[in-house]
Structure formats: structure tokens, C-alpha cells
Image (cartoon, rainbow, N blue to C red):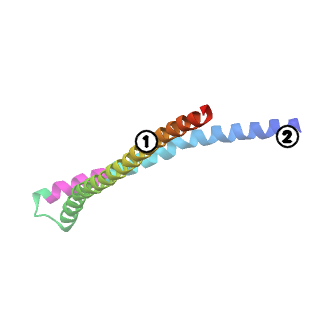
Amino acid sequence: MRLAVIFLCAFLVISLEVAAKKEPKVKSKVKEETVKSIEEEIIDIQSAQEDEPTEEAIEVEQELEAVEEEPVETQEKLKAKQGKREKSQKQTEKKHTQKKEKSKEGGKKDKKNKKSKERKNEL
């Protein structure tokens, strides 16, 4: 049983080492692909700047405008959520103050009841 566990651990260690050696190659391929795509986009942008705006350039501008508009919407949503939170906090504070007032009144009644009971006991 112990021997099987040792072999299993050794197999896992070896497979992890092999995977670690292969990983940098994958990363370098991904980096090369991204660099190529970025270079192509730069060339396209430069050619678009020289010529009249192409359809791709117009699409990119529209996407940028859409992205710029999104934060405004999210800010409005955040403000609305914050307003709701403040309302709920105020309501909970009101409830707590009401409970405190009720408990104080209840405490006064208990004291009065104790005093009246003491008086009855004295008589």
C-alpha cells in the first residue's frame, strides 16, 4: 500500500515537471499571437488615419463611446443603491430607537409595579 502511494506521488511529480516545461512554450506562442494581432491593429489604425475613416475605425469609435457611456449608467445605479441603503439604515435606526423607548417605558412600569408590591407587602 505504501509502495503504491510512493509510486503515485512520484508519477504526479514527474507529470507536473513535464507540464511546467511545456507551459512556457504555450505562453510564448500566445504572446507571439497577441503581438502580431496588436501590430496588425496598429497598421490598420495608421492606414485609417491616413485615409478616410474605414468601417472598422467607425466601429471601434462606436465601441469606445459605448464603453464611455457604461460607467455613467453604473454610477447612477450605484447612487440608487446607496440611496436605498440609506433609507433602510434610517428605518432600522428608527426601529431601534422605538424599541429602546419601549424598553425604557417598560422599565419604568416594572419599577412602579415593584414599588406598589413592596407597599402592599409592608401593609
- How crowded pointer 2 is (Cα within 10 Å; few <14, some 14-19, many 20+) is rated as few
Q: Is residue 42 above or below residue 57?
A: above
Q: x, y percentage for residue 28? A: 45, 43
Q: x, y percentage for residue 120? A: 59, 37
Q: Residue at x 34, y 48 (%)?
A: 90
Q: Label 2 sits on what residue type? A: Ala
Q: Which residues are magenta?
A: 38-48
Question: Alpha-carbon distance for marks 2 and 1?
Answer: 67 Å
Q: x, y percentage for residue 67? A: 25, 57
Q: Residue at x 50, y 46 (%)?
A: 26
Mark 2 highlights which residue? 4
Q: Nearer the viewer, residue 81 or 32?
A: 81
- Determine the residue located farthest toward the bottom in the rendered image: 55
Mark 1 highlights which residue? 100
How many circles with numbers are drawn on the protein?
A: 2
**Left or right of 97 on screen, residue 106:** right
Q: Nearer the viewer, residue 85 or 103?
A: 103
Q: If you read the primary sequence from the N terminus, does the residue marked by circle 2 or circle 1 appear first? A: 2
- Determine the residue located farthest toward the right in the rendered image: 1
Q: Secondary structure at mark 2?
A: helix
